[in-house]
Image (cartoon, rainbow, N blue to C red):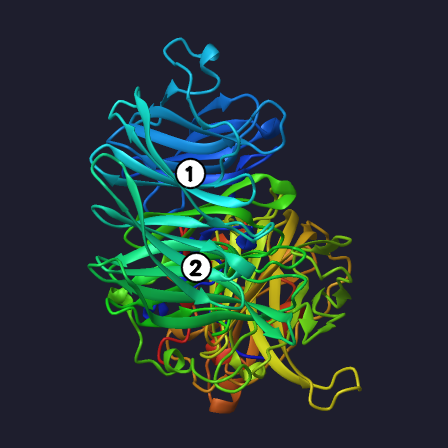
Amino acid sequence: MRAIFFVLLLLPFVIPVLVDDAFAAKGDITAVRAQSSGNNFEYDDADGLYNSLVQVDSDTFALAYRGTDADGFISTFNISSDGTTITKVHTIEHDTEFAWDNSLIKVDSDTFALAYGGDNGGFGRPAGFISTFTIDSDGTITPIRIQNHAAFASASANLEHDTNEGSVNSLVHVNDDTYALSYERNGLFLQIATFTISSDGATITELDQLNQDATNCNDKQLQSLVKVDSDTVVRAYCGSGGDGFLRTFSIAENGDITKKSTYEFDTSQGTEHFLVQVDSDTIAVAYESAEVSGGSVTERNGVIKTFTINSSDEISEADSLEHHSGNTPSTGNAEDNFLVKVDSDTFVLAYDDGSAGNDGFISTFTIDSDGTITGLRTANGGDNLEHDTSHSTNRSLVKVDSNTVALAYGGTDLDGFISTFTIGDASTDDSTSTESKKRSGACGFDRDCTAPRITKHGISETPDGFSINNVIFEENQKFYNENPTVEIGIGELTTIKARAWENMGPEKIFLAIAYLDMQEAKPNWQDSEAYIEYDIRNDSITIHDENKLFLAQASTEIVKDPYGDNQGLEFLDITFSLMFTKPMETSHVAIQVVDHIRNYELVYFKDALKVVDRPISEMPEFPGKIEKANTTPKHDEDIHFVLAVNGTEDTIFAAVDGHAIPIEEMNKEEPKIETPEERDARYHLKVKQSDQYERLLEYIAESQALHPEAWDKIVGTDNVSNQMEHVTDGTKTNVIKNDRRR
């Protein structure tokens, strides 16, 4: 057993993966608030679909979405610059009938316009509407023109610009008070229309409409519109045969629309589009592509492509990157894309994998001014972030500040959620590191594509992936797992063990964290009052223990073929050894394991552990001799203290030259020490007035005496010279190392 290092380092609570700035390379994704961390923000517990999130000011954000009864809602939120704090401010119901495919944009400093599909009198597809609002810096929403205007004295009716259909909306500002809207009409055609919207939102006037081309996307109808320059917009859409197309349009000062160039960028499939401008003449599109063989789709893939648009509005492809590969034709891949630019060349993509669970992912890229794409953290690179392991759809992503983004989406049960993430920038770039260079090969060679697991090894479940005191928690396959509570007494040795598997080998697991002292109804690592962070690479631990509940140590062991059916199978057994000095209410326990490039798994075990004040009926004798210390004490501060109990009376033992000596005897008159042998047998020191002695007595009185057998097992009898006592001065937790000459 390794020596104890009781270092109480009060780290700020960050995401579960405790990675410092040295590892925050460009494009690194850190979940601040996310479902995968158990702390995303639920803004609507009934429904939260067709999200459109925009920034109002530095910390205020507005969200248009479909809520209860499929009605239309606008809500505002305060989101702190670091993404840690999300507060709902104000909500109005702007449409009491229906709200579909929202596209919310800012008109001026406090005026906003919303294009959406609303009720058309029961004729099947939603009609097209535009509504307006003012939103103050404090988040107060005032409707200007809305469907539900009867509920607001100052409001009037919104504009129904298309009585037939107005779905799959994408609204952009072109110039001055002119706006362009791309939408689907009749379920067959993509329409583009222009409007003027006054700065106060009171006047909305349609200028022109242009029917484009037939669409053949079925339920994969996402399209998007983006402004290129003062009179040019470009649209990505699904055209003939489901192929991917781009088309440019010029917008005249009077709003007249003219078709310009068309470019077919994917001849197999091009759906689920989202466009973003890179610079003045470069755009990027994220979409779902397909591999086709024999006329049939064999797999679906996530792709980003870039294009340049010249002064004649002609389109040329610049670069292409497949970032998420291999999903089956039936499940899809890289659906419902949303791409955002966060700095001069860094882009963040939110999407779902199209599987049965529609899990949510965040990936990052750089895109240079010439259109060159470089994947930073991607699925194919093995290091993007799966932020929602349950469900994610109808998302909207927005930049919060220089390195923080917020994502609104429909999650579990289609409820509305907001998550936040930080993105590593150039100032913390570690691109020269060994790990950052290992991105080019196939999975399993120089690129790690899989998080370490305590729940599975490959495709097989790990039955004993988590245990407390050798009690195996049989339910371990979920994010939140329910098993019987293990009850232990203070002073007893408690072992929390995780059996971790890593596809690149157990030596690639570099960090393990155990979260304790969590009593909230829903487990959340941020509610943990105690955690043990074990740096496996450096064999060191950091303990955070706000309520001063325990002493702890950690160790690892590589285990080969534990089930006798696979000689190549290896695990890393991670053991946290604890001794509680105080009771702890029934607590959730969470285990996190992190690999060499920060892939991680975080698993919660609900109500896993309870510590009670259990009296010790039989106390084994304290060992009369422990491993001999390397040095001979010559001063008070050189004594190695061991805490124990003797019957009903507290006794402090001092390990002196390998012997356990009660302090009571040490405070007697010092006898003559005639020989080193005699001194080795018993060494008396007058230590009652020493600082160490007083602080040890205080600790004994405040907490509990420790079971000597358990202490011996934790510390290990071969590490007497390294023993450190976890003591208190009444105001803060400290560390005392009694062998000061080492």
- For residue 255, above or below residue 505: above
The spot of residue 24 in percent (x, y) is 35, 66
Q: Quadrant of residue 210?
A: top left
Q: Is residue 294 visible?
A: yes
Q: Position of residue 494 (x, y in %)?
A: 67, 64
Task: Say which element carries label 2.
Answer: strand
Provide residue 685's location: percent of width, then percent of height. 44, 72
In this rendering, the count of numbered labels is: 2
Residue at 51 percent of width and 83 percent of height: 442
Residue corresponding to mark 2: 245
Instruction: Name which of mark 2 and mark 1 comes first in the sequence.
Output: 1
Dot 2, crowdedness within 10 Å: few (<14), some or many (≥20)? many
In this view, the residue farthest toward the top is: 153
Which residue is disc 1 drawn over? 103
Find numbered disc 1 in the image and state the secondary structure of the residue it sits on: strand
Q: Is residue 111 above or below residue 362?
A: above
Q: Is residue 60 visible?
A: no
Q: Which is nearer the eye, 166 or 609?
A: 166
Image quadrant occupied by the N terminus: bottom right
